[in-house]
Amino acid sequence: MRSLKLIIHREFLAKVKNRTFIIMTFVSPLIMVGMFFLVAYLANLNNSETRNLAILDESNLMIQDFVSSEKTKYHDFSTYSLTQALDSVKAKAFYGLLYIPKEDNIKALASKIELFANKTPNGAFVANIEQQISHKLTNKLLTQQGVNLSKIDEAQTQVSLKIEN
């Protein structure tokens, strides 16, 4: 048993005293942090430019809800057909085309909306568009079911916590 402890001790010291073990102990966390910053940089690389997004809204439900901002400019392409709009978006080098087809059933419409993009769109950008569409379709569906939206807006409460130590 005593010789087993000596062997384990000797092998442990041989590994720990190795120069590569000592270097990698300090370098590997730096590599991990560097990878994190690289991913964050690449995610924001596509986020800094102003995006021109064409909207082809055949349902005429949402075109007025897309308000242009500093980073995103929305253009109404509702007078175009889908193929004309796609060709125009490519010719003008727009970021993409949001296609909202004509559909009477709101639940069915939610699954038929498409985003045609020239480049892979930023996740936050897509999430923002999805949130706007979801909010509008939910409100439209609630209105169709006879729910008073002003009552819901009045009932919403904002909570702000005060933190004390």
Image (tube, rainbow, N blue to C red):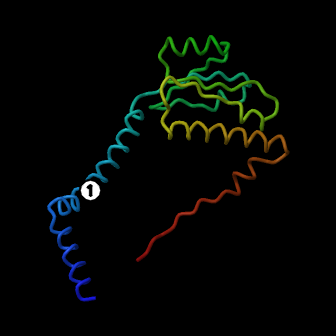
Which residue is painted at 61% across and 41% down in the image?
131
Pick the residue in front: 34 or 47. 34
Pick the residue in front: 61 or 125. 125
Residue 14 is drawn in which quadrant?
bottom left
Q: Is residue 71 left or right of residue 132?
A: left
Q: How many C-alpha atoms fall within 10 Å of the one at disc 1: few (<14), some, or many (≥20)?
A: few
Q: Is residue 88 positioned above or below 138 on the image?
A: above
Pick the residue in front: 27 or 60. 27
Q: Quadrant of the N terminus?
A: bottom left
Q: Is residue 45 positioned above or below 28 on the image?
A: above
The residue furthest bottom is 2
Tell me how many marks there are.
1
Which residue is painted at 77% across and 34% down in the image?
108
Which residue is painted at 65% across and 27% down in the image?
63
| Whole-percent x, y for residue 45 in the image | 37, 35
| Whole-percent x, y for residue 164 in the image | 43, 75
Q: Quadrant of the C terminus?
A: bottom left
| Whole-percent x, y for residue 81 in the image | 68, 13
Secondary element type, mark 1:
helix
Q: Is residue 107 positioned above or below 53 on the image?
A: below
| Whole-percent x, y for residue 84 in the image | 62, 10
Q: Which residue is mark 1?
A: 28
Residue 113 is drawn in which quadrant?
top right
The residue furthest right is 146
- Three-letter code for the amino acid on which mark 1 is drawn: Ser
Residue 42 is drawn in which quadrant?
top left
Q: Is residue 58 left or right of residue 70?
A: right
